[in-house]
């Protein structure tokens, strides 16, 4: 997969799957914007990539703000001259611990929807014009197998990511911009650890239908997303891919 001289933005890139994305992309020659609301952690990730000979820029972004998303894209283009790829990875896993929808605080509801779902649109609206200047590009959104389950506001927000991905793929196809989503299952990330232990994740995976109860490392998820960004996936568009060790079986 050739990524030479390409530029990518990854949101939520200061840890977990986002950090795995920027490392894998950098290893393939991509200049990466490490975009996160936690600038200090983002700078640490970017410094590690630079120390290994890659090109990286730490950018503070609040993905729930259209203005901040636009500024993130502008900073990336100012630093690297263009934009080819976008990974909409930022999200609030803590949403899975909120009360049922009938009891949820409306401020919490709006914040989760803004970060988990609306941000996909905000970042895409900011990034697509720059991709169009390059003759096209590719976008990967992070959904969840929770989008097909009943886990309250988290499910609702991730189901929105699925339909946004399908609709954006259709509307951006004329500009040669592909949009796909991946739906991870249980993943051992920093964001999950306050919610459940690795052992609990494995138990949850088995209860959800996975045969082995395997808990993936973030690199296993990011590797699929990197493939979807690549030219090898040029005819893959508007799809939502479970990356969950066989938890969700759709025939």
Image (spheres, rainbow, N blue to C red):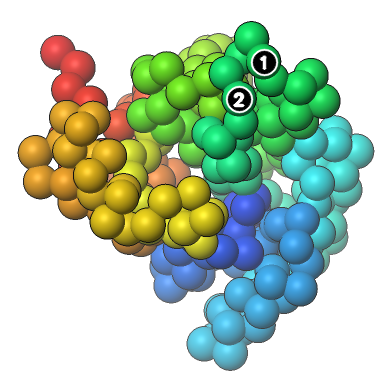
Q: Are marks 1 and 2 in contact (CB under 8 Å)?
A: yes
The location of residue 89, given as percent across then percent down, is 56, 45
Of residues 248 and 166, the one nearer the viewer is 248
Circle 1 packing at 10 Å, graded few (<14), some (14-19), many (20+), is few
On residue 71, the disc is: none
Of residues 138 and 40, the one nearer the viewer is 40
Placement of 201 over or under 54, stated as above or below: above
- Disc 1 target residue: 103
What residue do we see at 42% from left, 17% from top? 150
- Disc 2 target residue: 99
In-image side of 237 versus 158 (left or right): left
What residue do we see at 79% from left, 19% from top? 106
Question: Quadrant location of the N terminus?
Answer: bottom left
Q: Name the outermost residue toward the top.
A: 102
The location of residue 204, given as percent across then percent down, is 27, 39
What residue do we see at 61% from left, 31% from top? 98
Q: Name the outermost residue toward the left.
A: 211
Q: Name the outermost residue toward the bottom.
A: 51
Secondary structure found at label 1: loop
């Amino acid at each position: 997969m050739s990524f030479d001289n390409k530029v990518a933005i990854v949101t939520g890139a200061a840890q977990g799957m986002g950090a795995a994305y920027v490392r894998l992309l950098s290893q393939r020659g991509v200049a990466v914007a490490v975009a996160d609301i936690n600038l200090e952690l983002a700078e640490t990730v970017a410094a590690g990539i630079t120390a290994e000979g890659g090109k990286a820029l730490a950018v503070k972004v609040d993905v729930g703000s259209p203005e901040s998303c636009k500024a993130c894209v502008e900073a990336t283009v100012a630093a690297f001259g263009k934009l080819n790829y976008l990974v909409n990875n930022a999200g609030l896993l803590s949403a899975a611990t909120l009360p049922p929808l009938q009891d949820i605080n409306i401020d919490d509801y709006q914040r989760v929807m803004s970060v988990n779902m609306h941000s996909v649109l905000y970042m895409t609206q900011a990034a697509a014009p720059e991709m169009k200047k390059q003759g096209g590009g590719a976008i990967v959104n992070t959904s969840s197998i929770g989008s097909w389950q009943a886990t309250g506001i988290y499910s609702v927000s991730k189901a929105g990511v699925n339909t946004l991905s399908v609709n954006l793929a259709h509307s951006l196809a004329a500009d040669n911009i592909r949009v796909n989503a991946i739906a991870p299952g249980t993943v051992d990330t920093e964001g999950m650890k306050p919610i459940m232990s690795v052992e609990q994740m494995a138990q949850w995976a088995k209860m959800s239908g996975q045969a082995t109860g395997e808990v993936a490392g973030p690199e296993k998820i990011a590797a699929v997303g990197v493939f979807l960004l690549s030219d090898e996936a040029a005819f893959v568009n508007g799809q939502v891919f479970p990356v969950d060790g066989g938890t969700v079986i759709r025939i």
